[in-house]
Amino acid sequence: MAISFHYETKTEVEEIRLVGWLTRVIETEGKELGEISFIFCDDGYLLKLNQDFLSHDTLTDVITFDYTEGKFLGGDIFISVERVEENAKELVLDFEEELRRVMVHGVLHLCGYKDKDVLDMKVMRKKEEEKLKMFHVEQ
């Protein structure tokens, strides 16, 4: 079982460190790692997925396709690097920190967390913050 990274853009990430962190995130949710792929792309790539598969005609930072079976998390998590860069600027955050937030957001969706209403969004944000703190703990 593994976490893999695919690049449709020139962005590269600290794969080894991120795999360790995300694996711990999954374990703290009582789940097990199946096959998770992160695909880093641009706005146009993600917009087309949003239109074709979700019938949404809007830009977004992340789309998660969930293939989880039981306790084994699996899925494809598509991330628009352009949206993450824009969000980081607007929120006055470091790009890497915002990227980790979006990555863990996708993993939390695989864990069953939603963000369609205000209450769900509050729970999701709290979980994101909790899991982001785990990244900074020495592995």
Image: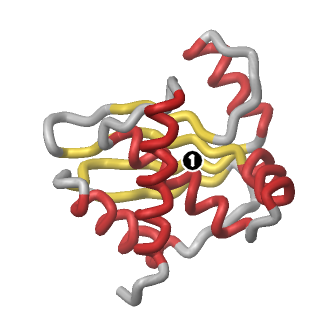
| 44 vs 108, nearest the viewer | 108
| 80 vs 12, nearest the viewer | 80
Residue type indicated by callout 1: Ile
Residue extending furthest toward the top: 55
Q: Residue at image x 40%, y 39%?
A: 109
The residue that disc 1 covers is 39
Considering the image in quadrants, where does the N terminus appear? bottom left
Q: Residue at image x 56%, y 16%?
A: 53
Q: Residue at image x 79%, y 57%?
A: 91
Q: Is residue 1 left or right of residue 79?
A: left
Q: Is residue 120 left or right of residue 24?
A: right
Considering the image in quadrants, where does the C terminus appear? bottom left
Q: Position of residue 86 (x, y in %)?
A: 83, 51
Q: Is residue 59 left or right of residue 133?
A: right
| 48 vs 8, nearest the viewer | 48
Q: Position of residue 88 (x, y in %)?
A: 77, 59
Residue extending furthest toward the bottom: 138
Q: Position of residue 22 (x, y in %)?
A: 38, 64
Q: Is residue 54 left or right of residue 133?
A: right
Q: How many marks?
A: 1
Q: Quadrant of residue 13?
A: bottom right
